[in-house]
Image: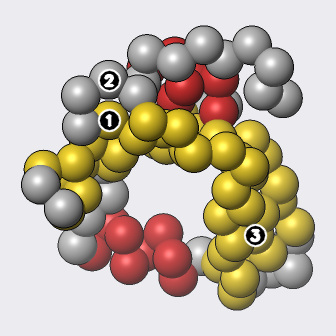
Amino acid sequence: MLSGADACAFRGTWDDIVIEVDQIVAGGQDLYAMAGRFVATGRNGIAVERPLGMLFRMQGDAIAEITSFGSGEEALRAAGEEASGYR
């Protein structure tokens, strides 16, 4: 998990970052999974696009924790959802 200076350094690597969301599902108690793509252009002009999954753990109305995965399927499984049908 990135925080503080690490998060600023990561963001500084990119000219543009977009998280494209394909699907959000409610999973187990206080869990939500997101399946989508990370699309970015580096400061050097190189474009990057890759699958992305994120698991959000809620505490009340606030996000308490975010875990990133290399694919949407992984995030959906972590939330207790069936990943079949997602690409």
For marks 3 and 2, the one nearer the N-term is 2
Label 3 residue SS: strand
Query: Quick one: quadrant of the C terminus?
Result: top right
Q: Report how far apart the C-alphas of labels 3 and 2 lie in the structure.
A: 31 Å
Q: How far is mark 2 from mark 1, CA to CA?
A: 5 Å
Quickly name the residue at label 2. 28
Q: Label 2 is placed on what type of residue?
A: Gly
Q: Quadrant of residue 40?
A: bottom right
**Residue that numbered label 1 is attached to:** 31
Q: CA distance from mark 1 to mark 3?
A: 27 Å
Q: Is residue 33 left or right of residue 43?
A: left
Looking at the image, residue 87 lies above or below residue 68: above
Q: Are marks 1 and 3 in contact (CB under 8 Å)?
A: no
Mark yes or no: residue 67 visible: no
Residue 66 x, y percent position in the rendering: 33, 48
Q: Are marks 2 and 1 in contact (CB under 8 Å)?
A: yes
Q: Give residue 32's position: percent from left, percent from top.
A: 41, 40
